Amino acid sequence: MHSARRGSAVIALVLVAIASARIISTYRVLSHTIDEPAHMGAGMEWLEAHRYTFENQHPPLARVAGALGLELGGIHWSGGRTLWEEGFRLLGRGEQYSRARFYGRLGMLPFFWLASLVVYLWTLRAAGPLAATFATLLFTSLPPVLAHAGLVTTDMALTATTASTVFVSLLWREKGGWRWNAVFGLCLGLAVLSKFSSLVFLPVAWLAMWMAAVQWTWTGIRHSIQESRRLANPALIVLAVACLVVWAGYRFTFHQVSYLHVPLPAPAFFTGVKAVWDHNSKGHEAYLLGRLSMTGFWYYYPVVLLLKTPIAMLILVVAAVTSMSGSGGSLGLRLPLAMAFGILFVSLVSHINIGVRHILPVYVGFSVVCGIVCARVWTLPQPRWFGQVAVCLLLTWFLASGAMQHPEYISYMNEIAGDHPEDYLVDSDLDWLQDFDLLATRLKRDHVQQIWSNCDVCGGVGNLPVVRPIPDGPSPSPGWTAVSITMWKLRPRYAWIAKIRPTERIGRSLLLYYVPPKY
């Protein structure tokens, strides 16, 4: 048994190393995405200006990690007046642009390692070393995970800290003691510092897991009351530690919170929560299946998972769900599945529908249950070869589906989307401006000095020539025109884009047109 665990751990480390190399290989290929300059600027303000005032809709943890990476690359605070100004200064142009992307993104890699560790340990605890190996293979090869583990954003940090908090809560409930109180509180505090959606995801995930556990191991109301009393005092200690961690994350600030009319520790935390609440109330421009909405679609995230998850994994998830009604529906299978579907369920009411990245922790639960299913099928008693062939075919399909789109993991969609994924999804699921460096390389070949574009945030940094807004008119202007698919779908202003065949497609997200000069 010990040798099996040792072998499984070695294989898992190799898988994480391979995945890390795949992630790092995208750094210099994909240009900065829309959100990265803002996160870099805010993180550098926290790290070197010793304050956090630029923007409070996101907590500082992931941003500071990106800024630490920038410092590793010798890039420092420039005194920008806004987070965007600071972020664009940090990115710069030419060699600094390449260096800033590389080192800033390198600072996010530990979150991927932490999430992979949680997947391995959770599956190992639930079903043993074979299942843990399969789960690690699945998680470290998922295109959405590889995509967002390679960006200076909050989404991989949310995934890692949410998953570790949920997993540690299981160990805390079983083992108890001051050490586990401290570890649980630390994890909870870091989850809150990663993204405010953790404040919703964690309670709902725990509720879903409690319901799954009660259904499986119900021992009566008296035992439940006794268990609640046993955990009450430790839970208060956990909460106190978490609050201290959050306060430390906001540099132990203590000021007036205007809308509450009272001074509080970490005031930016409270104003940040309100900012997210207001943002969700007002909504955000969203696109799904050819439709636009400012308040989102209740079915957005189920559709996103259907399109952004490799079909082989979807098959394994369905197999896990169907096994719940039989003798195979163990608690080890129920808990991660409950966590994933709990997060998906609460996301149905969100009015901010801009990408699978917002529910990325779902993939931790999916990977654990799929690893368990693979191990069970692999070890079918009769006929043994059938289960092994089935698992090999599914895993081959799964791995090939993602590898064929390397390094374009951001725009990955499975075979359902076909050749025109923009008919289904845009934004960070397809076009997050990640292909503008590929565009710069293409234009440099023809010595292009100026382009027209419908993207208003792609100029000023990187290696692009001068970028001008597309002029109004029934046809494209002479010269080169680069069209961001997201900007086109969200703001369908230029009718000629849908009528004229582009000269070529850059990556999967940009349409490039060339109109010869008129003589």
Image (tube, grey):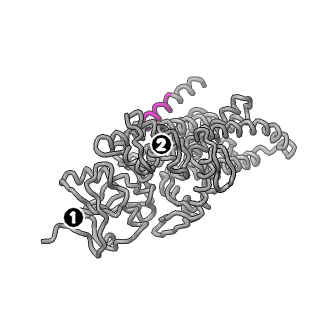
Locate residue 136, reporting x and y percent: 52, 38
Give the magenta-colored segment's residue range: 10-19
Tag 2 secondary structure:
helix
Circles 2 and 1: CB distance less than 8 Å? no
Say above or below: 260 vs 158. Answer: below
Horizontally, residue 78 falls left or right of residue 59, namely left
Q: Quadrant of the C terminus?
A: bottom left
Report the residue at 41% width, 33% height from top.
72
Overall secondary structure of the magenta section: helix
Locate residue 488, reporting x and y percent: 38, 66
Report the residue at 59% width, 49% height from top.
196
- Does residue 98 appear in this view? yes
Q: Which of marks 2 and 1 is nearer the N terminus?
A: 2
Instruction: Assess disc 1: are there few (<14), some (14-19) or many (≥20) residues with their C-alpha within 10 Å of its C-alpha.
Output: some
The residue nearer to you, when weighing 435 against 44, is 44
Tag 1 secondary structure:
strand
Q: Tell me if residue 16 is in the magenta stretch.
A: yes
Tell me the CA gap for discs 2 and 1. Answer: 40 Å
Q: Residue 45 carries which label?
A: 2
Amino acid type of disc 1?
Answer: Gly
Say above or below: 123 vs 356. Answer: above
Horizontally, residue 322 falls left or right of residue 475, namely right
The residue nearer to you, when weighing 127 against 57, is 57
Q: Which mark is residue 479?
A: 1
